[in-house]
């Protein structure tokens, strides 16, 4: 199974500059924080989902549907316990805390889906280069992109060792979660040790290729902010301004809830 | 805290950041399904790595923990809460080597070769877990996402259990190898690149007050145990909820500041000098 979320599609969202997509992602995080009324939050979620539909990435939501459902249930439950309202419903549930929980659940789900859209439409190299172009030091961005690239390699090595041991008769499937963790830990040690051991070879390989030798770097991937990017940012700013204007006009709030 | 920035000059440290982040994320991701508070935290045996990598790789382990946690979020739960996850996990890796230097200045070898070091390690795990939980729970309560009491207590326990149960074993396995390969942060970095400790004992105390004290006071505020005090001061019962939210938002800032100040005071140069004098390297 491919652990990465990126989907290779030819959509206008995919063609946007990664910096534009980072801007839109941050904007989406602001957007989901504007309203406390679940109905308005639902409208915000619809906007985010429509953007995901345009990016042809909604298929990726199948991978996290369980987490999204659990978030909704747990958030409503938590805020019903820790928050309080004015209108009793049943047991310890009050109408306002239930509505607040729903709004927060939709907020978190919206933010996660916005993150999914970004990761489904942006390659790792684009994220790293985009970060550097935004002023993040190259060595930091390099560490992030290298780590991203190594995760599946480490997972695959762990899986290979597990399969090799299974073929020799080791039972890794039976037992409860604690017993399974105890069986798997000894198998993971060689993975960590061999990964850490490669540090010196990795460092020498990098330095032999001139890592950090010059102050100015060039990149294979060249990024450009085009008219398409400007248009996307302006359109999004208009949506954000409209949402803020509605909120400032007194709509989308939630009365009677206290924490 | 100078070493947190100067470490980026060393290619080996950059690679250690990437590798420790990748290992942390690779073990975090399979456990994404074992959720405790969905979208925020799950059962995390991988949380043993920030403690161990923090001790062995110093600032590279701290950056690795922060980036590894962010990459874990990249696999399905990236959100605004990821910012606090980044900062919290950074301190989860930073505090172990800072406090280790304060506890074992004379013998800074990062392994569990005595009962004293085992007790010290357990204490460090608890302080670092509380500091990490404080950052994450405070930020998420401030955003109104998850109540402080729920997130703060779960993260502290979750981190501490992983560190206390698996940490000593992993440290015993990794330390001799990492030392043989010359990958300890105290061997890679130069003393002038690392801040010296200032008022080490006071720094140690402030770290405990900031981390464990912060989480205890936060839980007291969040659970409303202060209620009688506020009632006596003339607050109406209806106002308690607002006072609670404000209390967490403002009340935790001094504790978070204490954690940062203590991290600066605890330095780390002494560990580097002791290690390099011990191994015969010219300092």
Image: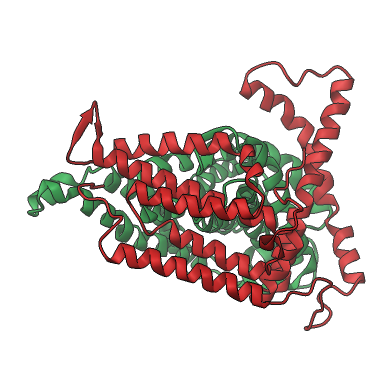
Chain colours: A red, B green
Nearer the observer, A150 or B220: A150
Q: Quadrant of the N terminus of chain A?
A: top right
Residue B68 in view in this figure:
yes
Nearer the observer, B199 or B222: B222
**Quick check: A143 above or below B65?**
below
**Quick check: B191 above or below B90?**
below
In the image: residue B87, left or right of residue A142: left
Q: Position of residue B5 (x, y in %)?
A: 64, 72
In the image: residue A218, left or right of residue A236: right
Q: Position of residue B167 (x, y in %)?
A: 63, 40
Residue B185 in view in this figure:
no
Number of on-image labels: 0
x 80%, y 50%: residue: A196
Q: Position of residue B200 (x, y in %)?
A: 49, 64
Nearer the observer, B255 or A31: A31
In the image: residue A181, left or right of residue B102: right
x 57%, y 32%: residue: B34
Nearer the observer, B74 or B89: B74
| Residue B10 lies in quadrant | bottom right
Q: Position of residue A25 (x, y in %)?
A: 56, 61
x 80%, y 71%: residue: A221
In the image: residue A64, left or right of residue A44: right
| Residue A105 lies in quadrant | top left
């Amino acid at each position: 199974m491919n652990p990465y979320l990126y989907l290779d599609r030819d959509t206008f969202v995919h063609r946007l500059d990664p910096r534009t997509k980072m801007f839109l992602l941050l904007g989406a995080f602001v957007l989901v924080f504007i309203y406390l009324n679940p109905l308005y939050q639902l409208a915000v979620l619809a906007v985010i989902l429509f953007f995901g539909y345009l990016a042809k990435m909604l298929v990726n939501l199948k991978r996290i549907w369980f987490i999204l459902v659990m978030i909704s249930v747990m958030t409503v439950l938590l805020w019903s316990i820790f928050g309080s309202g004015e209108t009793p419903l049943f047991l310890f549930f009050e109408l306002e805390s239930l509505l607040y929980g729903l709004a927060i659940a939709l907020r978190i789900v919206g933010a996660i889906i916005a993150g999914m859209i970004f990761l489904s439409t942006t390659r790792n190299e684009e994220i790293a280069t985009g970060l550097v172009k935004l002023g993040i030091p190259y060595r930091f961005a390099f560490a992030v992109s290298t780590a991203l690239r190594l995760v599946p390699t480490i997972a695959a090595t762990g899986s290979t060792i597990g399969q090799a041991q299974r073929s020799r008769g080791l039972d890794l499937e039976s037992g409860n979660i604690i017993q399974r963790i105890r069986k798997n830990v000894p198998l993971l040690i060689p993975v960590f040790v061999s990964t850490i051991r490669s540090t010196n070879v990795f460092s020498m390989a990098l330095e032999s290729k001139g890592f950090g030798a010059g102050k100015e770097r060039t990149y294979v991937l060249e990024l450009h902010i085009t008219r398409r990017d400007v248009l996307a940012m302006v359109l999004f700013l208009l949506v954000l301004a409209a949402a803020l204007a509605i909120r400032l006009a007194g709509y989308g709030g939630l009365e009677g809830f206290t924490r | 805290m100078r070493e947190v920035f100067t470490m980026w000059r060393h290619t080996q440290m950059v690679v250690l950041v990437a590798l420790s982040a990748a290992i942390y994320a690779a073990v975090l991701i399979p456990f994404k399904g074992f959720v405790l508070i969905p979208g925020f935290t799950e059962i995390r045996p991988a949380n043993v790595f920030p403690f161990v990598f923090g001790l062995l790789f110093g600032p590279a382990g701290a950056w690795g923990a922060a980036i590894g946690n962010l990459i874990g979020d990249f696999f399905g739960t990236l959100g605004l809460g990821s910012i606090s996850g980044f900062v919290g996990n950074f301190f989860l890796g930073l505090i172990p080597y800072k406090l280790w230097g304060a506890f074992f200045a004379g013998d800074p070898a990062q392994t569990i070769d005595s009962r004293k070091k085992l007790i010290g390690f357990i204490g460090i795990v608890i302080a670092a877990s509380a500091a990490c939980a404080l950052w994450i729970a405070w930020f998420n309560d401030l955003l109104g996402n998850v109540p402080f009491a729920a997130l703060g207590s779960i993260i502290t326990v979750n981190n501490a259990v992983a560190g206390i149960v698996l940490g000593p074993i992993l440290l015993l396995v990794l330390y001799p190898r990492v030392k043989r390969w010359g990958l300890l942060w105290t061997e890679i970095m130069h003393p002038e690149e690392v801040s010296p400790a200032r008022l080490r004992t006071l720094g140690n105390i402030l770290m405990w007050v900031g981390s464990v004290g912060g989480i205890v006071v936060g839980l007291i505020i969040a659970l409303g145990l202060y209620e009688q005090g506020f009632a006596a001061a003339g607050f109406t019962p209806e106002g308690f909820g607002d006072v609670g939210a404000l209390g967490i938002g403002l009340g935790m800032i001094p504790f978070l500041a204490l954690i940062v100040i203590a991290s600066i005071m605890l330095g780390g140069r002494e560990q580097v000098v002791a290690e390099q004098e011990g191994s015969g390297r010219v300092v």
